[in-house]
Image (cartoon, rainbow, N blue to C red):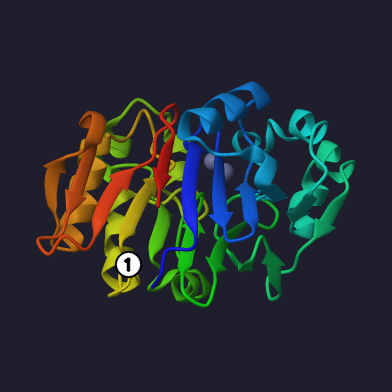
Amino acid sequence: MTPEIHLHVLASGSRGNAAVVEGPEGSVLVDCGISRRALLGRADELGVDLGRVRAVLLTHEHSDHVGGLTVFCNHFEGALLATAGTVGARRYLAELPFTVMGHAEELELAGMRVRAFPTSHDVADPIGLRFSTDDDALGFCTDTGELGPEALGALEGVRILALESNHDERMLATGAYPAYLKARVGGPTGHLSNAQAASALTRLVGPDTETVVAMHLSQDNNRPSVCVRTLAEAVGAEVVPGEDGRPEARTPDGRLTICCAAQDWPLSVW
Ligand SMILES: [Zn+2]
Ligand SMILES: [Zn+2]
């Protein structure tokens, strides 16, 4: 594959999510769950031009994914896209000029084909996304308790894979969360654990896969080092000291890197 699609994670985690997927003819903002000020500041830090954003796509209506959208839209004239269920789930979303997108349809945005697939989360109609050009592909999937066949099919073999790795199952089980919350987070419509993500990698990582970005890490029930180690073991990668002290893993042939997105530490993957 030739790198034509790039990922800039501005924030990832339960206190806010936003990512810019940069294509050949502009960018797409996936979720807008941080303030406009934070969005601008972090984009600036990464050298990302938000003026190139052609569309905003929402994965679902939880406030950590949509909380910053109303203010962002005061300064944005591009397309707003989400499923009918997501738009209908919050009055303030329904009042914005959304174009409803279906699961089956493939959109053309910023020089990329964009396809949605259903995820498994406790909201109306959540989705994950696959972005592709003739020569490149990126998969994006967070906030899902399970990966169904459509998700696995869409994420398989991409060059950049942004995949939720929310919690360590033992840390969640022995941690301070009340029982109902443990059941929700660890359940089939909650969040993907490190072990679930690791097991998925054995199928999803293909010969073209260069980077796996672990997404939406819990600050209470996970650690970047634990997450990277679990994912690394699944694909025969070794943990190495990453840039800026962030944990990272690499396969011995150097072809695959595993890293973590963070709540407050923006990250670019080229
Ligand atoms: Zn979330
Ligand atoms: Zn959510």
* Identity of the residue drawn at 45% across and 51% down: 187
* Residue annotated with mark 1: 209
In this view of the protein, can residue 246 be seen by the observer? Answer: no
The residue positioned 76% from the left and 64% from the top of the image is 101
Quadrant of the displayed image that contains ligand 1: top right
Taking the image as drawn, is residue 247 in sight?
yes
Number of dots carrying numbers: 1
Q: Does residue 79 sit above or below 76 in this rendering?
A: below
Mark 1 closeness class: few <14, some 14–19, many ≥20 residues within 10 Å: many
Along the line of sight, the residue nearer the viewer: 110 or 260: 110
Answer with the quarter of the image where residue 85 lies.
bottom right
Residue 79 percent across, percent down from the top left: 79, 52
Q: Which of the two residues, 1 or 106, is positioned nearer the viewer here?
A: 1
Q: What element carries label 1?
A: loop
Q: Quadrant of the N terminus?
A: bottom left
Viewed as shown, does residue 168 lie left or right of 11? left
Q: Specify the quadrant of the image occupied by residue 113.
A: bottom right
Q: Is residue 42 above or below residue 129?
A: above
* x then y, percent, for residue 26: 64, 54
> Quadrant location of residue 35?
top right
Q: In this view, does 106 lie to the left or right of 133?
A: right
**Above-or-below relation of 184 to 238:** above
Three-letter amino acid code of the residue under disc 1: Thr
- Give the residue at x 47% y 50%: 7
Where residue 127 sits: x, y (%)? 61, 59
Which residue occupies 50% across, 72% down? 154
Task: Report x, y in % for residue 33.
Answer: 62, 34
